[in-house]
Image (cartoon, rainbow, N blue to C red):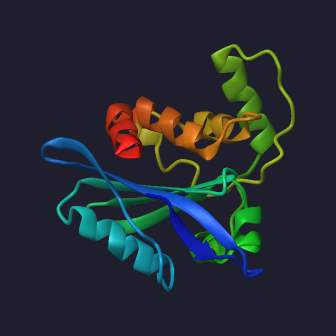
Amino acid sequence: MVGANQGMSGGTVSYFAAAVVRGANGWSTAEITLNGASDVEDVADRLRDVEPDAEISLLFVESDDSYLVILRLDEGEDLRVFGSDAAFAEESRLGALLLGEIEEAVPDLDAETAAAEAEEGDEESSPPDSDPVGDADLLTDLGVPSSRLLAICAHEGLLPSDMTAEVCQAIGCGDEIEELREA
């Protein structure tokens, strides 16, 4: 099920919000709705409700085949947010809700992306069209360093669903997210 939300210009913004939580029995997933959320803390509360005792709770929000936002809670606390493009906050109510309070841009995006592409052996390097914001290190301890996350977001032609799949594969819950998407 894909949700919908009113955009800033009155149009409908489609999104997919997948919670990925790691508890005592490993990774599990659930789709959550963001309709009626009043702010990012309300979204964090909905993520906490998926599994209140989870060690790690992640929320992947994909919007309009253009944007990806990742939220993270550790043991239900310390909300961290990363967005693939700051433009999302300007283009929709959902983007403003998720990214509106983030003020820090990701520093040295070109250098980070070039380093990650060099590691992966990608010879074609072009400047990214996106302007990532937030905490690009939020998945580092799970095996996705900021350079890799930024390279994924900067990869031309990659849809948010592809970004989510690649990140989830890297952190060990690729099958779970695929099953959720197929349900």
Quarter of the image with the N terminus is bottom left
| Residue at x 60%, y 63% (from the top left corner) | 14
- Where residue 139 sits: x, y (%)? 46, 44
Vertical placement of residue 49 versus 158, above or below: below
Q: Residue at horizontal 78%, vertical 49%?
A: 130
Is 106 placed left or right of 137 in the picture?
A: right
- In x, y percent, where is residue 80? 48, 62
Say above or below: 138 vs 15.
above
Q: Position of residue 88 (x, y in %)?
A: 71, 64
Foreground residue among 81 and 65: 65
Q: Residue furthest right?
A: 126
Question: Which of 62 and 71 lies nearest the eye of the viewer?
Answer: 62
Rendered location of residue 112, percent (x, y):
71, 36
Count of numbered circles in the view: 0
Q: Residue furthest left?
A: 24
Q: Height in image: 165 above or below 119?
A: below
- Which residue does the image show at 80% across and 39% down from the upper left? 110
> Would residue 179 appear left or right of 146 to someone viewing this image?
left
Residue 180 in the image: above or below residue 51: above
